[in-house]
Amino acid sequence: MTMRITALACAALILAPAGRAEEAKTAPKPDPWKITWEVGAEERVRSEALNNTFDWNDATEDHRLWYRFRTRAWAKATIGTKGEVFVGLNNESRKTVHPDTEFKWDEVVFETAYVDWKIDPSVSVRVGRQNLMKGEGFVLFDGTSGDGSRTAYFNAADVTFGWKKSKVELIGISDPAKDWYLPVINDKDKLLQEWNEAAVGLYYTGRDLPKTAIDGYLFWKSEKDDRRAPTHPQLQPDRQLGILGGRVVQQLPEGFSLTAEAAGELGQEKPKPGATGGNKDIAAWGGYAYAKKTFPVSWKPSIQVGWVGMSGDDPGTSKVEGWDPLFSRWPKWSELYIYSQVPEKGVAYWTNLSMWQAEVLANPTKSLGLRGTYYYMNALENFNGSPKVFGKGKKRGEMLQARADVTFSKALKGHVLYEYLKPGDFYVGRDSAYFLRFELIYSFKKIF
């Protein structure tokens, strides 16, 4: 009897793997055409107050207080392993309290409208209206700088070739000054930026080396048909330029890391309408570098120290040396300072800058993130702007920032941001400026 039981047990052990293998062979494969739907919505409410950000002068009444209400709604269809189709709508309306203005509903626009398709496991294509962010957004992040933080989309085609942990993307962009490609509900004829923009380029993302991240990029861009009046002091002639750059992040022992990015620009700018002379050569540069130390405790404190630089235009030469931020006109370093750039070159137009940065980050709890930042800001070149605003020096000023991010639940989060800047002799005014924001975001999505 014992021998019979032992024989049966041995037979079961021998046959079981074969049975499992046979079962695996007959198990149904995932349906590559099965459609999964996602619908979602988001409501963002912001209160923003600012003062002296345009001229640094208390005698001028430029205090602003407004409330911003941004509503998003979207639907996405994921088609098995093949790809996805995504469509999203966006509206941001604003109520200005100081000075008091009437509330009006703003436009409803298509924020996203793209098709993403896998041609094979290593090649995919995404075509249509989409968000693009590469690296830290130093050259590629916001394709609609003129509408603030309402949207950041690009009208683009992105073809990706991937292998292991790396990829190369061929990207083509067409961003007209106004929304030509898709319908706009309650159209206000808004400018998305001052001119028509188009670009084509390559972006390499390399993650195959241990503890090392490498990015490299090459773009050619045109900026044409500035929509501002011929008498506008910031009117920009048509220009074409190429940019070549790269970014490296190196993880080091003991919680240290080093990050650096640098790029150079070459091109030509035509003379302004009615001006004499030929084309001007463009030769500019930009970059940043910082070191970071993260401490191995539960609240994840870190310290970061670095420098940011972007060339300015030397008035003593015939070249255009001012850094062109390409597609990165967004408040990467400051919400306050983007308004100060309006009389210089344009909102969020980062150029002619040498800035030292020191920053402290911490997460005391899972739901609370804290940040404190100090900037010492200079210009690399003097600026021949309005004598009512700009001085003869190169010190832009010193800025302090404090921010707290709070996660209340999976659906609700918010933050508080305060920025303070004491201007230097780059400006005539010497009165300090501030920016204060409170934000709440509620979002949900349903997958079925």
Image (tube, helix red, strand yellow):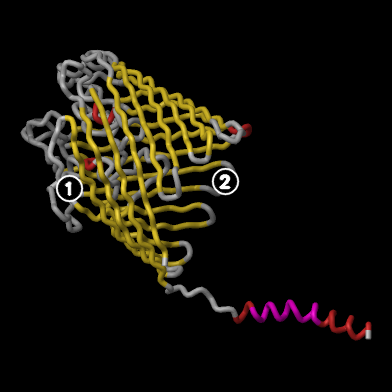
Residue 27 image position (x, y, % from top left): 59, 78
Q: Amino acid at mark 1?
A: Asp
Which residue corresponds to the image point at 20% horizontal and 58% vertical from the top-left? 182
Is 195 colored magenta in this rendering? no
* Left or right, residue 115 beside residue 80: left
Query: In the drawing, what numbered circle is on residue 106?
Result: 1
Marks 2, 1: nearer the viewer: 1
| Quadrant assignment, res 437 | top left
Which residue corresponds to the image point at 19% horizontal and 36% vertical from the top-left? 269
Which residue corresponds to the image point at 29% horizontal and 46% vertical from the top-left? 152
- Report the Cα–Cα distance between label 2 and label 1: 48 Å
Query: In the drawing, what numbered circle is on residue 209?
Result: 2
- Judged from the image, the secondary structure of the residue bearing numbered disc 1 is loop
Q: Residues within 10 Å of mark 2 (few under 14, many from 20)?
A: few
**Vertical placement of 149 versus 384: above or below?**
below
Could you say which is closer to the camera, residue 313 or residue 177? 177
- Judged from the image, the secondary structure of the residue bearing numbered disc 2 is loop
Q: Main secondary structure of the magenta part?
A: helix
| Quadrant assignment, res 267 | top left
Residue 433 image position (x, y, % from top left): 27, 21
Residue 72 image position (x, y, % from top left): 29, 52
**Magenta-highlighted residues:** 12-23
Could you say which is closer to the camera, residue 374 or residue 381? 374
Residue 202 image position (x, y, % from top left): 37, 49
Q: Is residue 316 visible?
A: no
* Left or right, residue 405 beside residue 426: right
Residue found at the very far right of the displayed protein: 2
